[in-house]
Structures are given as C-alpha cells and as structure tokens.
Image (cartoon, coloured by chain):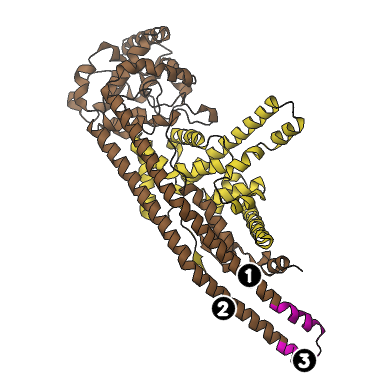
Chain colours: A yellow, B brown
Amino acid sequence: MTQTMGSPARLSSDPADEAAFQRAVAGARSGRAPAFEWLWHRFSRQVTAFARLQGSDDPEGLANDVFAAAFGRIGDFSGSATNFVSFVFAIARNKINDEHRRRGRRVMISNTEDGFRERLEASNPTHSAEAEALAGLVPETADALRRLTDEQREIIFLRLVADLPIEEVASLTGRSVGAVKAMQHRALVRMRREILRGAVSR
Amino acid sequence: MSAFDDSFSEMHDGSFTEDMAEQLFSGEIPTPELLALAGMVGDVRGQASSTPTPAVRGALAEYVGVGLSATEASAESPAPGAVSEPTAPTRTRSRKSVIAEAVTFAGTLTGKIVLGCAVAGASIAGVQVSGVVDVSGFGGESDSLVSTSGFDDGTPKGLPFEDDGTAARGRFEMPAVFFDGGGNEPSGGEEGDEEAESDEAEDRPEREEKKWEGSNSEKPSIAKPSADEPTSDEPPAEKPKTQEPAAEKPATEEQRVEKPNRKDQDDAKEAAIRELQAQLHEDKEAVYAAARSEMEPLEAEKYTLSQALNATLHELETARNQAKAPLYAERETADDPDRLAEIEAELLAIYRQWEVDRDAAVAEATPAIDAVKAQLEAIELERDAEINRLLDEYHAAVAAL
C-alpha cells in the first residue's frame, strides 16, 4: 500500500517546468533581470530553509550571497533544474561551512574564560545554533533529527529540502552513491526508532 | 521483552528497504507502520515551501531588482552601481551609462592616467592598424586599448562574490542581443547624438564594428582588425591595461559607498523603481505572512492527525502483541499437536484481525489528513499565484516608467 504524504514544493519533472527553467537560464545568461528573478523566486526558499536548518546565523543573507555567486557563474552552468539546485547547494554548503568555521574561531577568541565551552563549541560550532536551527520543525521531528549525526542530517536535508536525487547528493557531498544510501538508511532507521521510543514513553 | 522491543523487532531494519526509503523521500507512505516517519519526512520537506522568499539585498540586487531597471524598464537609465560593477545584468546597460562611467572615471587621478594612456594607445594603434606604423607591443590588441571594454565588456571582474574564490571572472559572454542589434540593446536612435561625444571615441570602434555587421554599404570607416578583437573567452589577464581600473573591483565595499555619490546621475525614474521594489517586497512579505498564518494551524492539525493515527496504530500493535504473548508462552510448553495447531490458528487470526484493524484505522484517518493537505496545497497555490501577480504588476509598472 502506498499513499501520498504531503506535497511540498518539489523539483518538477514536468517538461513545461523544465522548459521554463531552461528559458530562465538562457535569459540569465543574457543578463535579463526577470530571468534572474525567476530563478531566485523558484529556488531561494530551498536554500534559505537549508541554511536555517543547518544553523546559519543569517539564512536569508546567506541565500542572497549564494545566488549572487551562482548568478555570477551562470555562464558556466548548463544542465537541468536538478543540476542547478545541485550547483546552488554546492555553493550554499561551502558558505555554511565557512560560517561555521568563522563561528568556531569567534568562540575561540571571545570566550576564552570558559575553557570547556570554548572547546565544545570550537569542536562543534553548530552545537549552539542547533536548537534555533530546528525550531521551525515540530518538536518530535526536531528531537529525531538531533539524534542524527551532522552528516546524516545533511544528507536528509539535501534529499528533502533541496529535493535532490541520491546521485546528486553523492556528487555534492563527495561520497559514493552507496555510502549516501547507507547514511540515509541509518538516518531513517534512527528517526523511526525515536518515534517508537517517543510513542512508548508517552 | 518490552512492547517497544517487540514492536521494533517486528518492524526490524531489514524490512526497511531502499525502495521504502525512496518512497518516503518522494513523499509517499510505503507502509502504514511508516506513517509517523513519513510525517517527519513531510515536516522537513515542508520547510522549503513554508519559507518565504527572502528579501533581495546586497550584491544580488545587481541581478534581481536593480538590474531589472537597467535592462527591462529603460535602456537609458542605468541602475545605481551598474556602472561601477560590471555584472552580468549590467552588460546590457545603455551606452549612456558607459559614457557616464567613462566621464566619472576620467575625473579621477587613476582615470586620467589610464585614459590618457588609452588615448595615446588609441592613436598609435589607429595608425598601426591603418598600416602607417607598426608598433610592437600593441600588436593584436591595439584596438583593445581604445575600447572601454573595461567598463562594458561584461567581464565580471571584481564581482562581489569573490570570497568564494571560484567566481568565474571573465567567463561571461557578451549577450548575443548586444551584437545583433535586437533584444535588450538600447535603441539605435539614442546613439546618434550621444555617441558623438569625443569622450566615447575610444569606445566606438569595436562596438560600431558589431553594430554595422551585415550592413556593408554604410559601415563606418573605422580601421579595426577583427581577428584581433578580444573575445569574451579571454582570461582577464589578457585584457589590455585600460581595464586596470576595473581590476580594482575587489574593493567592492568602497565602490558601494561611492554609489550614492552618483545618485545625481539618476532621475526620478530610479526613485520610482526603488519605490516599486520596496512596495513589491512589502506586498510579497504580506502575502507570505498571510499564507503562513493560514498554514500554521493546518500544519499543526495535519501533524496532530498523523500522530493520532500513529498512536492508534501503536495501540493496535500493542494489543496484538499482548494477545499473542500468552499464546506464544503456551506454544513453548504445549505438547499436544492439536493444541499447537489451534495456537497457530489463533495467532494467525490475531494477526489477520490486526491487519484489518490497521487498514481500517488508516482508512479512517487518511481522508482527514488528505483534506488538510489539500487545504495546505490550495493555500500554497493561491499564495504563489498572488506572488506571481505582484511580480507581473511590478514588471508592468517598471516597464511603464
């Protein structure tokens, strides 16, 4: 039995949508502002949501930076809408990682009196931002996601928020397809386990 | 063995197949047991659709919004900053803007030096090209020296995203419309008097060559070896020295600070466009906020319904396991084959009944969940339609300016 659950905005396999995307890319290559706006309107929410879930201090600003960089390189881009999402999310990942590194350095510098906290946050810069990052989710989902490793969580977000197929996620994260499949399987099993634990404890 | 362990062992990981995972990721519920997990997956997936489109700011405004004013609304009125930062959308800006840029740039000390060299180079190159003299060092790029390509060749030097370290400088191609006289190219009519200005003389050879392609009869008699024409594929390092001012672009912050100083070159149209952009942003935020306020209770309701179904399913499983437990225990000790067969039949009956109850619970709960989802989708569609309408209105208003 297979039912449909939810229908958040997904990359459409609709040829018309893909054609619209290709027109937008062609327009963007010609420097047409409406084409850039179309791409921004179509994909920026995914990047913003991803940035927020990954603990960015300023998800909207990061999305702005990501798209400014992507639009600057639009001449280099060719491919499908999925390829574009992968292209954009590759930039987003780098910027988020940069942000985490900067945050880690800031903690090292500004919090020298609290040695333990300093080491904790420097070793895991996303730690302090995690609660806020997952605040938009229902508590049970947030709890389950917290049980995942950073890598598992990223895989889940890339699959669900970026709506990328497994091959693109593998390429984006520099892992094999098999490794990504294994990670997402473990992530889902762990999430389900959390659901069952929660149900039993209630 | 606890109820949890029992339940979990029945839904052991081995039964969680790759196909099921893909079904979950694609928004489906592979089995009723995975309903709650599908709810979580849907919750994460819904993050993107429930996130409003962020406000455009910073460097992105050069592409989205401000760039619109330069390319769509008017070919004559460049956007602020479009002159100083040659980004992709600004490549289609008018020649007036290039003149303004050249004049402004010429006013600076660096500009005087560079343009002075450029004019000198142009003189030498012009003579060289026309076969009067041959100056080594100016060779194939002699005509490049007299162009203002540093301002308008579309090479995104010093783009505000250099922090990536991967920005594709100089990879942009000049838009085809710029060459073929169609599309976004400013109307030829404006060029007549504006481009008679001597300040732009160095800009003309390359551009005029393009403009008059295909019209041999009236082609201006400006010497220019096309074979030497710099192509958009050339790396920035091969660009002539007249582009050095543009190569200073990494100081984008400073340039942004300078932009307000050029406001006096803008007119009421620019202000009107900015007002429209601000209004658009405000309207879009209002639409998103309204949609969010409608969607949030529905999202909560959907989650509650899903959780209620999950709880029901869990209760059914627990009841099934409790019913089976004494039978399992008896089966361990029973010797009578008839009794063993009865036990197996009872266990099977319990399992069958559980299947019936489970399907009934799912069937009962699903319509309500689907109804909420349908409402959410309708709100999303309405919201997106409203956003598109606002964008259409904005574009129309800008075009009408």
Front residue (pair B98, B129) = B98
| B308 inside magenta stretch | no
Residue B146 seen in the current view: no
Choose between B370 and B185: the one closer to the eye.
B370
Q: Is residue A91 left or right of residue B289?
A: right
Relative to the observer, which residue lies in front, A202 or A129?
A: A202
Give the percent coordinates (x, y) of residue A158: 55, 48
Q: Which residue is mark 3?
A: B337
Question: Which of labels 2 and 1 is toward the front?
Answer: 1
Residue topped by disc 1: B315
Residue B136 in sight in this render: yes
- Element at badge 2? helix
Give the side of residue B74 with respect to residue A183, left or right. left
In the rendered image, the quadrant that contains the C terminus of chain B is top left
Does label 2 or label 1 sit earlier along the sequence? Answer: 1
Magenta region: which residues?
B323-342
- In what element is the residue under mark 1? helix
Reading the image, the residue beneath label 2 is B356
- Numbered disc in front, either 3 or 2: 2
Q: Mark 3 falls on what kind of element? A: helix
Q: Which quadrant is home to the N terminus of chain B?
A: bottom right
Q: Chain of mark 1?
A: B
Which is nearer the N-term, disc 3 or disc 2? 3
- C-alpha span from label 2 to label 1: 14 Å
> Which chain does the numbered disc 2 sit on?
B
Q: Chain of mark 3?
A: B
At label 2, the amino acid type is Val
Asked if labels 1 and 3 share a chain, the reply is: yes
Task: Let me know if residue B331 is in the magenta part.
Answer: yes
**CA–CA distance between discs 3 and 2?**
28 Å
Q: Residues within 10 Å of mark 3 (few under 14, many from 20)?
A: few
